[in-house]
Image (spheres, grey):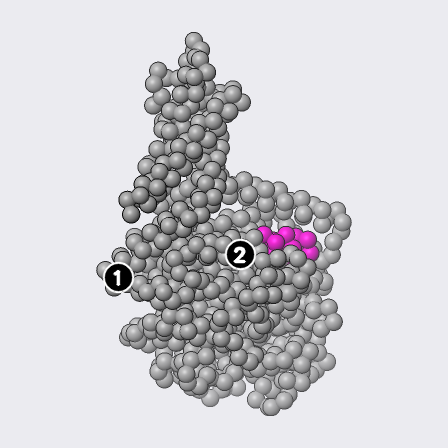
Amino acid sequence: MWRGRWRTAGGALVRVVLVWAVSSLTMLALAGILPDFRLQSGDGDSITQIGLTAAWGAGAFGLLSALVWPVLVRALLLVPALVLGLLVFFLNGSLLLIALSLIPAGRGEAAPETAVVVAAVMSAVASATSTALAVRDDEAYRRRLYRLADRRRRRQKRTGAPGADESAPGLVFLQLDGVGYETLRRAAGDGLMPSVAGWLVGSHRIAPWRTDWSSQTGASQLGILHGSTFDVPAFRWYEKDTGEVVVCNRPTSAAELQRRAVARTADGGLLTLDGASRGNLFSGGADQLALVLSVSARRGRANRSRAGYFAYFSDPANAVRTALSFVAEVAREIRQSLRARIRGDRPRVARGGLYPLIRAFATVVERDVVVAAVIGDMLAGRAAVYADLVAYDEVAHHSGPHGRDTDQVLARLDRSLAMIARVAEHAPRAYRIVLLSDHGQSPGETFLGRYGLTLKDLVRAGCGLPVPRRAGRTRSGAEARAAVLAALHRPVEEGEEARPRRGSDPVVLASGNLGLISFPDVPGRASRARIERTHPALLATLANHPGVGFVLVDGVVLGPGGAVARLDVPGEAEELLAPFGPGAAAAVRRTDTFPHVADVMVNSAYDPRTGEVHAFEEQIGSHGGLGGEQGHPFLMWPTELSDPGGELVGAEAVHGVLRRWLREADGPQVPVDRRPDARSSGPQDGPRPAAGEDGPRPAAGEPGPYRPVPEREENSRPLRTPGGTFPSAGRPVPDETR
């Protein structure tokens, strides 16, 4: 036993000495290259003296980095996360200046700007050397991981925390945002994603599933993590009872949607048992959170939603590596955008302004932080981890879902998956990795690009209202922009659209190729009769426009050429909506029952031959409505897990499958007690079983446990009892700083 301990201690000492030696040589090289950095006195020193000076400086810098840096970063928790990413370089340079001041006889000296460069290079070299040595000494690395896991297991047993039994395999759910079923299979078959291809050949199986009408991350991820997609008609919608525009990627909206889902299901979510939620819109009930939007608006000691950034940037080498990759990604986007413009690619949208920075954040910063957090969760032995990688979705919106730009993103995502799989081999418990997506992407020219006007312009024309001579662009809304603003500690608002003024003008909102029209001055849901009496030309203008596929109003679907189908007449909607694929009528029928469905819902035209749609936002790769690959994400699981069984329709069904896999691995999840405030959203008939649990699942279109709908008057349909008010005042959710 003693011999083994001495061998371990000796190996650690050798690694420290080697890192110290490499750092000293790096400092010597930089002193010879940089004019404002010296390691000798003014009278000159011998080679030996200069070498000793470098060793002294490297040792002092390494010691300060190990002892002072974690404390320094923790003290800066109030600084916006991305600001900290830049501040890292200056703080690291300050530590180097302090280390140089500790060298005897004042032999070390550097200009402040040079110190920043020297510190960044030395941190990167030291990190790379340490990592290489740890990889070579695989047995020592494994022993260290097991010691950390054993320490955590003993602590959990003392406190009675969940997850103490790590004999059962854990589950890691990795969401590839926006990657459709056919896109993943093509990428694997073409060699873009060799790791995924290898899994499909040997260890994993894959199947498509079908989204609801609202084919976007807000609805899908809420359903996957919390088991309910009820009353989420789109990515953004107007609620007449509160006068608010709900936007799924706004922190206050995400918090409220999560509260409503928990109240409806009477369950905390998929991750309530020793779970971790990383980079998601919603928490899933996890007790370990980082980069979760639904808690990013909350403040307090226990709710530092940006903790994942601080945990990542607490290693200066991470900041250096990510910063270099960030700059490279910005340059790549500018080059690709310029090349597309020179070639005259069509369709094309504007990619200037802040978009290169937002893209770099999604494809570099958020990817690196989320992957690092997942790796940390596996090494800590957590039972369930759910993480969202948004890189492909962000690039596909502006570059299109198929092409060189998105192919490069898929290849880099595959490398991240391979890294996670390699780390899983060293984790203290076995892990099963499940890949899935929340929706796909459908290509096509924007509605504005094809027809020269926005949906809002078309609606105003149909209402007889003045239309601007110059069509304004509808800003593209995506998860990455909200994540950037949350990281900068800024609220996500949308100007006047956040709280429209009540009046006669309709509120027109876009969610990909799905449009929503609401009349704020009409109480409840406007009936078809009232709309036709007030705005006689509106519905016909919309339904007969070549860029519109169909319109839903007051339980009736209107199509081109005067086609009409009532949802309560069997077969009528199925025939009219057949071009949009199987299940389209059921999805529309279910959305029609939502309390906050818009007065008029507009789905763009869809070409089954090309798979193209027309987004009402500035996106040439879009999702949010019906039509094409956007409604066909994938679920990919290890063969050790049971087969999902049959066709999966809706995110709630996926939630049921994931719950079953968690039960197979480590027992049932912990439900949330029904509190009085959980019933404040309206009467309920008791907890509704999650999809896939024992008990009947509500049929498509069933309102569920909301108050029955009053009889409809001629002029309006009253709103059902709303699922809550803004802002949410839920209890604090614990967060994590590592």
Q: Residues within 10 Å of mark 2 (few under 14, many from 20)?
A: some
149 to 635, vertically: above or below: above
Q: Nearer the viewer, residue 399 or 245?
A: 399
319 to 481, vertically: above or below: above
Q: Residues within 10 Å of mark 1 (few under 14, many from 20)?
A: few
Q: Main secondary structure of the magenta part?
A: helix
Q: CA distance from mark 1 to mark 2?
A: 32 Å
Say what amino acid the circle numbered 2 marks. Answer: Leu
Q: Give the labeled residue for mark 1.
A: 157
Q: Name which residue lies at 49% across and 49% down.
A: 368
Decide whether residue 310 is among the magenta residues: no
User: In this view of the protein, can residue 263 be seen by the observer?
Assistant: no
Q: Which residue sits furthest left?
A: 158
On the rendered structure, is 418 left or right of 544?
Answer: left
Image spot of residue 396 (x, y percent)? 62, 58
Decide whether residue 410 is among the magenta residues: yes
Q: Name which residue lies at 52% across and 76% down.
A: 643
Specify start and end residues of the magenta stretch as a single range: 398-412
Q: Which residue sits furthest right?
A: 343
Q: In the figure, residue 394 lies in which quadrant?
A: bottom right
Q: Name which residue lies at 64% across and 88% down.
A: 572
Secondary structure of the residue carrying tag 1 is helix
Q: Nearer the viewer, residue 102 or 245?
A: 102
On the rendered structure, is 597 left or right of 725?
Answer: right
Say what amino acid the circle numbered 1 marks. Answer: Lys
Image spot of residue 552 (x, y percent)? 59, 78
Q: Name which residue lies at 34% across and 18% down.
A: 104
Image spot of residue 69 (x, y percent)? 36, 38
Q: Give the labeled residue for mark 2.
A: 417
User: In this view of the protein, can residue 538 be seen by the observer?
Assistant: yes
Secondary structure of the residue carrying tag 2 is helix
